[in-house]
Image: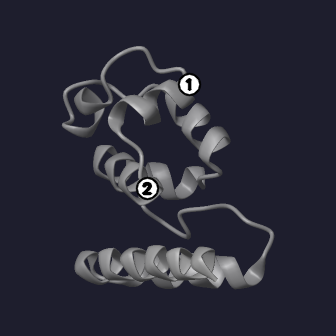
Amino acid sequence: MNTRIKELRQILGLTQKEFGEKIGFKSSISEIENGNAPILDRTIISICSVYGVSEKWLRYGEGAMFITENPELNEFFETYNNLEKPLQEFLIQCSRDLLDAQNKM
């Protein structure tokens, strides 16, 4: 689960401090990401609530990362989850580039 928390934080483009502050986590997120601190149920619930993450994905790595009522987004997230890490990073960078281009229009 610690690697999924790190993956989520990186996808959201947040520092460990920013990520932790938004969920009310007082300790270092790096301790969780490195597997040196336990992940309490209240932390899991906060992450899922604040960031719209599927608890099933966070706990077990199953299903889509994010919860959404939009079937197209669910398909996008499912596709993303099935990509290898380098392709996930490429997709994220392409999305950021598209957003930058859109903002310049």
Q: Residue at x 41, y 74 (%)?
A: 92
Query: Looking at the image, can residue 25 be seen?
Result: yes
Residue 41: x and y in percent read 52, 28
According to the picture, the residue beneath numbered tag 1 turns out to be 42
Residue 54: x and y in percent read 60, 55
Classify mark 2: residues with Cα within 10 Å, few (<14), some (14-19) or many (20+): few
Residue 53: x and y in percent read 59, 53
According to the picture, the residue beneath numbered tag 2 turns out to be 60
Q: Residue furthest front?
A: 105
Q: Is residue 10 above or below residue 43?
A: below
The label nearer to you, 1 versus 2, is 1
Task: Give the amino acid type for the residue marked by disc 1 in the picture.
Answer: Arg
Q: SS class of the residue under badge 2?
A: helix
Could you say which quadrant of the image residue 77 lies in?
bottom right
Task: Give the amino acid type for the residue marked by disc 2 in the picture.
Answer: Tyr
Residue 54 appears left or right of 20: right
**Most foreground residue, 48 or 91:** 91
Q: Earlier in the sequence, mark 1 or mark 2?
A: 1
